[in-house]
Image (tube, grey):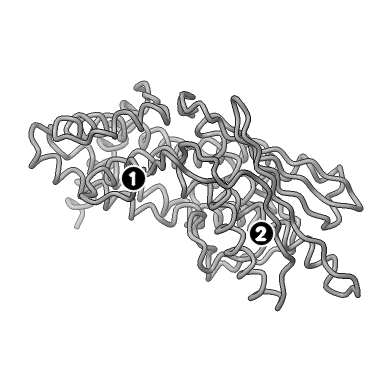
Amino acid sequence: MEIKTKQTWSMCKSLLKEVKEWGCLKQTGVSLRYMTEFGSNPTDTNLLLSAQFLHKELPIRIARRAIELHTLPHGLSYMPPVLKVKDWYLHSFRDLRSFSEIKNMEDEKEFTEMIKAIKMRHNNVVPTMALGVQQLKNVSEDPDHIDEFLDRFYMSRIGIRMLIGQHVELHNPSPPPNCVGYIHTKLSPLNVARNASEDARSMCYREYGSAPDVKIYGDPDFTFPYVPGHLQLMIFELVKNSLRAVQERFMDSDEVAPPIRIVIADGTEDVTIKVSDEGGGIPRSGLPKMFTYLYSTAKNSMDESQPPSDLGTIDNVRMAGNGYGLPISRLYARYFGGDLQVISMEGYGTDAYLHLCRLGDSQEPLP
């Protein structure tokens, strides 16, 4: 037993040493345009090059996050949810580093199956980390430090999942029309807004028994290259928040609840999507807190025995109370060079502006 313990400790020390070494290496960012151009011709040569790139790049990104998870303040590194996440990252780092050099398509196929398993292993990182942060909520004296860490951590996670998902999807023998991996080259923001709104209204019906209308304005023929899953997630979050605000303001009123309005504008540089509501707005003092992970305008609904679903899946997502929907949506917007801004009129309503860079040549913002 003692020998086994010493061996395990020695292995842990050597693994952590390797993690620190790889965490010091430089990350390599890619752009939406590069992903589209490279993936538009998924030959064996290109798939092999992609796998070789990921074989080197993923351990660097994962190592950086594992190091941060190991050195968090306020004892956050030792909270059970965070220890679980750190274990997932170390496990994935070890898998990647144990995989020998990728020399042929047989190696590439085996590597692709392994990174698919890694992506699945990390499915519940967001809700699990949210539990750890929730436990910290009443003891932290430095919320800004935690927010900065979580912004880096979640932004890195978006990039890791995008790179893995893009590579895996390039193996699809029958890709949907106009799709290059995860990227839709002719995506209709109006159609995505319609689908996201229907999902959000269905949730509102389940929660409250009714839901305000959503009106969408924009050119139905306009398309641009983007990742449908990212756009669906961001619009869903914004519409969900607006529906809740309007529903709760008018649920005991004789007045008909005013609709949420979505306006889609096609600019030279940006595609901008505005989500407007008349849900009473947010006090000016609350606006700076909207993009922090320790804040929610709703009564908190997190139950430690039932962590919230990961962002990116609509099923079982609560209407409100988790406090991380908006900050993560802003990270998704910023991942490809966009942004998310919220302007509120207390006593009237809120406008959220989702800016998406349509040029597609913005590099990943690597934390």
Give, as a three-letter code, the residue at label 1.
Gly
- 113 on left or right of 264: left
Q: Is residue 65 above or below residue 87?
A: above
Q: Secondary structure at mark 1?
A: helix
Q: In which quadrant is the N terminus drawn?
A: bottom left
Say which of 54 and 170 sits in front.
170
Say which of 235 and 329 sits in front.
235
How far apart are labels 2 and 1 at the CA level?
Answer: 26 Å
Q: Quadrant of residue 259?
A: bottom right
Q: Quadrant of residue 54?
A: top left
- Mark 2 burial class by Cα count in 10 Å: few <14, some 14-19, many 20+: many
Residue at image location 51% in from the left, 34% down from the top: 335
- Mark 1 burial class by Cα count in 10 Å: few <14, some 14-19, many 20+: some
Image x and y of residue 110, in percent: 14, 46
Give, as a three-letter code, the residue at label 2.
Lys
**Residue that label 1 marks:** 165
Residue at image location 49% in from the left, 57% down from the top: 310
Image x and y of residue 148, in percent: 60, 35
Image x and y of residue 303, in percent: 59, 68
Instruction: Point out the residue furthest to the top here.
Output: 26
Q: Secondary structure at mark 2?
A: helix
Residue at image location 61% in from the left, 52% down from the top: 325
The tag earlier along the polypeptide, 2 or 1, is 1
Q: Determine contact: label 2, label 1, CB under 8 Å.
A: no
Instruction: Point out the residue furthest to the bottom here.
Output: 209
Image x and y of residue 13, in percent: 28, 37
**Residue that label 2 marks:** 240
Say which of 28 and 172 sits in front.
172
